[in-house]
């Protein structure tokens, strides 16, 4: 996807202008809003994280965190269970 097309897609799907996106990313310290990574870890770049029920944008995240949140279906309970599992199986 070309750069101009990506910004248009972000505006249509998340309601963010390019300036709003960069403002949000800057408020996060120019890093993943979830893990703090400074590189997106994907050639597709950073992802706009949003609540799939309300559509509200939560932040900008790296590819790994976007996949994790999506796989957990935005569920705090699923993520907490994953943390418990990791702690139990150290």
Image (cartoon, rainbow, N blue to C red):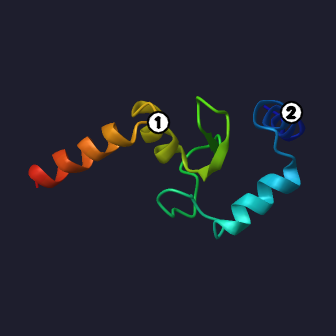
Pointer 2: residues within 10 angstroms few (<14), some, or many (20+)? few
Q: Position of residue 31 (x, y in %)?
A: 60, 63
**Does the image show residue 45?**
no
Asked whether, in this view, residue 40 is left or right of residue 2, the answer is left
Residue extending farthest left: 89
**Pick the front one: 69 or 43:** 69
Q: How many marks?
A: 2
Nearer the observer, 36 or 80? 80
Tell me which corner region of the image, top left, top right, bottom left or bottom right, holds residue 1: top right
Residue 5: x, y in percent?
86, 33
- Rendered location of residue 78, percent (x, y): 32, 37
Farthest bottom residue?
29
Answer with mark 1 or mark 2, whichever residue precedes in sequence: 2
Q: Residue at horizontal 47%, vertical 45%?
A: 64
- Residue 12: mark in rendering: none
Q: Nearer the viewer, mark 1 or mark 2?
A: 1
Drawn side of residue 12 relative to residue 33, left or right: right
Q: Quadrant of residue 44?
A: top right
Indicate the secondary structure of the residue bearing disc 2: helix
Residue at 50%, 56% (x, y): give it.
Answer: 34
Residue depicted at x 58% and y 50% = 61
Quadrant of the rendering where the C terminus is positioned = bottom left
Q: Which residue is mark 2?
A: 5
Q: Is residue 25 above or below residue 59?
A: below
Above or below, 75 relative to 22: above
Judging by the rendered image, the residue that carries numbered circle 1 is 74
- Can residue 85 be seen here? yes
Front residue (pair 62, 15) = 15
Q: Secondary structure at mark 1?
A: loop
Q: Residue 23: where, in percent of width, then height?
A: 79, 62
């Amino acid at each position: 996807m070309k750069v101009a097309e990506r910004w248009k897609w972000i505006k249509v799907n998340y309601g963010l202008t390019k300036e709003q996106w960069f403002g949000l990313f800057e408020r996060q310290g120019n890093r993943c809003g979830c893990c703090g990574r400074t590189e997106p870890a994907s050639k597709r770049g950073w992802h706009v994280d949003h609540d799939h029920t309300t559509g509200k944008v939560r932040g900008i995240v790296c590819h790994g965190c976007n996949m994790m949140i999506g796989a957990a279906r935005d569920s705090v309970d699923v993520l907490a269970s994953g943390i418990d599992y990791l702690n139990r199986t150290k």
